[in-house]
Amino acid sequence: MRDEFQKHGVTDDKIHLVSLPNRQIAEQSRIRTTANGRILFIGRLTKLKGVSHLLRAIPIAARKLGRSLTLTIAGDGPERENLQALAQELRVAAHFIGWIQGSGITDLMYNSDLLAVPSLWPEPFGLVGIEAGACGLPAAAYRVGGIPDWLCAGESGELAPGDPPTVGGMADAIVRALADPSHYARLSRGAFEVASRFTLERHVTRLEEIFRTVPRRPVHAVLPAESIHV
C-alpha cells in the first residue's frame, strides 16, 4: 500500500507504515519437525486468490516430492464450483470445507503442514500468514504485494516469483518447503519467530510515535449545508 501511495504522488513524509498485529496466541511448543504433506488454503474463492494455480501446482509438487499431497480449502466464493471441478479433473485430493470460524481456524493450522497463499494480486499484507506462523505453520506464497513483509524466503516459508506468478513457481516453492525435514523444521521455527514480532504492543507503540509527530492544526468549524450561500 505504501508503494501504491508513492506511485500516485503522496510524499514520503505523509506515509507511515504500521504493520498489523497478530491476533493468534503463539505457542512455541507447537513448532513442528516433520511434515506429512497437508496443505492449507484459507480465504475467499475468487480468481485473484490464485487457488486454480495452487490446484495445478500440487500434482507437479507431489511428483517431485515422490509422495502424495492433500489440500484443505477453508473458504467460499464465486469460484468454488469451478475449483471443485478442476480439482476433480486434476485428481487432487482437495477438501472444500467452507468458512470456518474462531478456534476452528487454529485447529486447521495446527493440523496442517504448509499454508499456501497463491494470491495473484498485490495483497496489502496477508494477516493469515502471521496467524499461521504463530502456530508454527510455514507458508508458500507468491512474491506479491505485502506478503514479503512477513514471509522471509528460506526463513519462515518459501516464496515463488510473482512477476508473473506461475504454476511451476508455486510447485517449486512447495517442494522447497517440504522436501527436507531439517529445513522444514527451521521454517516452522522461523515462522513462529517472525509471527512473534507482530505484537499488539508493537503496533500501538508505533501508532503513538506517529501521533506525536503529527503537527497540531487548527480545527475549523463545518457549517451545515443550509447555512452556505452562493
Image (cartoon, grey):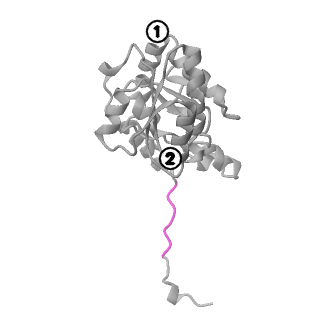
Q: Residue at x 53, y 36 (%)?
A: 88
Q: Quadrant of the C terminus?
A: bottom right
- Mark 1 falls on what kind of element? helix
Q: CA distance from mark 2 to mark 1?
A: 36 Å
Provide the residue span drawn in magenta. 215-221
Q: Nearer the viewer, residue 206 or 177?
A: 177
Q: Which residue is mark 2?
A: 80
Image location (x, y in percent) of residue 147: 55, 35
Residue nearest the viewer, comparing 74 with 10:
74
Residue 165 shows up from this direction: yes
Q: Earlier in the sequence, mark 2 or mark 1?
A: 2
Look at 50% across and 66% down and name the residue there: 218
Identify residue type, mark 1.
Answer: Ser
Quadrant of the image occupied by residue 2 = top right
Q: Mark 1 Cα within 10 Å, few/some/many (few <14, many 20+)?
A: few
Which of these two is toward me, 150 or 71? 71
- x and y percent of residue 208 in the render? 42, 45
Label 2's element?
Answer: helix
Q: Is residue 37 left or right of residue 142?
A: left
Q: Position of residue 149 (x, y in %)?
A: 54, 33
Name the residue rendered at 51%, 31% in the picture: 116
From this view, report whether residue 44 is shown above or below residue 34.
below
Magenta highlight: main SS: loop
* Crowd band around label 2 with a 10 angstrom C-alpha radius: few (<14), some (14–19), many (20+): some
Displayed quadrant of residue 48: top right
Amino acid type, mark 2: Arg
> Which mark is on residue 182?
1
Between tags 2 and 1, which lies in front? 2
Q: Position of residue 74 (x, y in %)?
A: 42, 40
